[in-house]
Amino acid sequence: MKIIVGFGNPGSKYNFTRHNLGFLALDFYAKVHKLDWQNKPKFNAIVAKDDEYDILFVKSQTFYNEVGQCIRAVCDFYKASPQNLLIICDDFNLEFGKIRFRERGSAGGNNGLKSLVSHLGTDDFPRLRIGTANDSVRSQIGDTDFVLSRFTDSEYEKLPQILREIEDFIVKY
């Protein structure tokens, strides 16, 4: 089984923020494939299962910077190695909408990835980084507020295409 994790923060106030792009990607996939989300308190997560592709989708209900706790619990329960994961997260250093896949690598300043590396004891897991860069907005408000900011109107218009590309990647993955 593959375990695909979308990074984000729980709570409606974070919907459509840059840090919740991972959640958006999983929600889009679940809608297209008619999957239902279920609360799993033992993981502190919401999960959906796609039996056709043998994938478990996970949205941690910890905050972004603590996602490692949840994912470690999921991996332990399913006896899954880090290589069975696919992490989907935002990256403000990548051009908006650019999708970059890596089999492994450093956290690159992403606090969610740092948490995951800390809890798994390795950075040897696949990740799909989705670009959210907007230097003009970021320079005005700083990094912390930037990742928690909502998309601009022009970025919002591009989201459906980006989410379709991620959904297509997951199906082929």
Image (cartoon, rainbow, N blue to C red):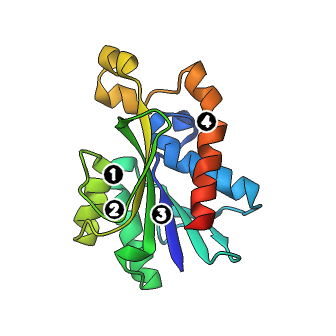
The residue that disc 3 covers is 44
The residue that disc 4 covers is 159
Q: Residues within 10 Å of mark 1 (few under 14, many from 20)?
A: many
For residue 117, say whether it is visible: yes
Which residue type does callout 1 highlight? Gly
Q: Classify mark 3: helix, strand or loop.
A: loop
Which residue type does callout 2 highlight? Gly
The residue that appears at 37% across and 16% down in the rendered structure is 136
Check if mark 2's residue and mark 4's residue have beta carbons within 8 Å.
no
The residue that disc 1 covers is 112
The residue that disc 2 covers is 68
Q: Residues within 10 Å of mark 2 (few under 14, many from 20)?
A: many
Instruction: Determine the residue located farthest toward the right in the rendered image.
Output: 34
Could you say where residue 100 lies in the image, as x and y percent from the top left? 42, 50
Q: Nearer the viewer, residue 140 or 131?
A: 131
Work out how far the residue at label 1 is from the one at label 3, CA to CA, in angstroms: 15 Å
State the image quarter where residue 46 is shown: bottom right
Could you say where residue 77 lies in the image, as x and y percent from the top left? 45, 82
Check if mark 2's residue and mark 1's residue have beta carbons within 8 Å.
yes
